[in-house]
Amino acid sequence: MNIFGRELSARALRERTGDLESVAGVRQVELANGTERGVRAVELRTAAGLEVDVLVDRAMDLGAARFRGVPFGWRSGNGFRHPGLHEHNDEDGLSWLRALDGLLVSGGLDHTLFGGEVDASGYGYPPRQTVRHGLHGRLTAVPGRLLEAGEVWDGDHCVLRVRGEMVQATSFGEHLRLTRTVEVDFDGLEIRLRDVVDNLGFERTPHMFLYHLNFGWPLVEEGTEFLAPISGTLWQSDSVREQGVSYRHLPAPRPGFVEQVFEHRLVPDRDGRHRVALVGPGGGFGVEVAWDSAAMPHFFEWQNLRSGQYAVGLEPSTHHVAGDAAARDDGSMIWLEHGESRTYTTSLRVLDGVDATAAARARIRAVADQPE
């Protein structure tokens, strides 16, 4: 392992410290103040300087994220609110926006994108022929059941691993389970996610899934560039035409900026993975995100460049931006029978230095170029 610039075996490292937590490790904590009170979290910290918090009671999403003390995950100001405070049906289904904070907020498990009323007659409960969904579904307010949190050694290699499960269920409705594993290497710069969604119920159940990966200042700054192998843009919000801000090169924060959303058609690499990156001004720092293109074929870029918020969201998705009702109409909805499952694998890598960002640029350009 590379520990502070030195190659050390596990034995050599243990000879030099009585507690490996002094170098890297896993720590369970509980947030104790304000709207976050009672939220359990697991802190992962690597010898390379990568730190990320897994929010157990927030669907095991990713909260604060830092590299060598510098944040790269976005903080919205909402805080990591306790799920008991979440009002799913408030504000015409937009109350999810009060839970939007941190590096990853997942959407699902039976609905993503904007809300609305859809058919629920398949569950066979006459009093409820339809179900109303809010923005990005119910998952973010589902607390996790922690199954594992610790170090996993294999010879001189160590992985810091957190694993848990969330069950989204109701009587006479969906009964879906998400089993999430988050891993980082003891000396690593990469966060790896493996999500398995399965249907525990005995009714045919719709499934939609989305990752809202959120990045903030100082990675997001005037001059930050978004890199992706793009063959075309399938959809963009009206605000793009009205404001004229580039999807590719970011400006400084703007008062009153109206969010811009793009759905880009990405070209997968030879391994069948989609790959995108954000590179900060000067090219000295960035992040690269890669995921299974077959599992999540769609991708959205979210620009929230408003003063006081200032973020970019990179959003792999199972479905097109048109959402739930459209997916049912065009046949693209995923339906899970009892025991069926879907698996999602995603990695987020910190790019440390100009050589690392140049290598990421080369990997993406080897797949396809992108419009200016």
Image (cartoon, rainbow, N blue to C red):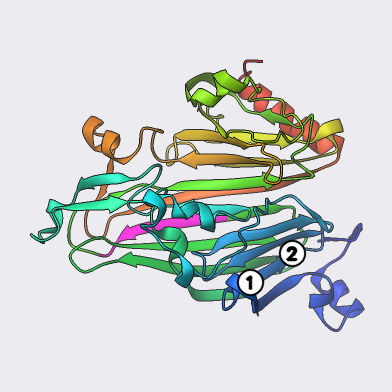
Closer-to-camera residue (33/202)? 33
Q: Residues within 10 Å of mark 2 (few under 14, many from 20)?
A: many
Q: Which residue lies furthest to the top in this view?
A: 372
The residue located at (10%, 61%) in the rendering is 127
The residue located at (21%, 69%) in the rendering is 171
Q: Do the residues labelled 2 and 1 touch (CB within 8 Å)?
A: no
| Residue 272 appears in the rendering | no
Residue 196 falls within the magenta-colored stretch: yes
Circle 2: residue type: Phe
Q: Give the range drawn in magenta.
A: 193-200
Q: Mark 2 points at which residue?
A: 186
Q: Is residue 279 left or right of residue 153?
A: right
Q: How far apart are marks 2 and 1 (CA)?
A: 15 Å
Q: Name the residue under label 1.
A: 42
Circle 1: residue type: Val
Residue 80 drawn at (x, y percent):
59, 64
The residue located at (58%, 39%) in the rendering is 314
Residue 320 drawn at (x, y percent):
39, 33
Q: Relative to 139, does residue 232 appear above or below in the rendering?
A: above
Residue 9 falls within the magenta-colored stretch: no
Give the mark, 2 or 1, whose residue is nearer the N terminus.
1
Residue 294 drawn at (x, y percent):
43, 37
Dot 2: element: loop
Quarter of the image with the N terminus in it: bottom right
Dot 1: element: strand
Closer-to-camera residue (328/199)? 328
> Which circle, 2 or 1, is nearer the viewer?
1
Residue 264 drawn at (x, y percent):
52, 26
Q: Relative to 173, does residue 293 appear above or below in the rendering?
A: above
The residue located at (22%, 64%) in the rendering is 201
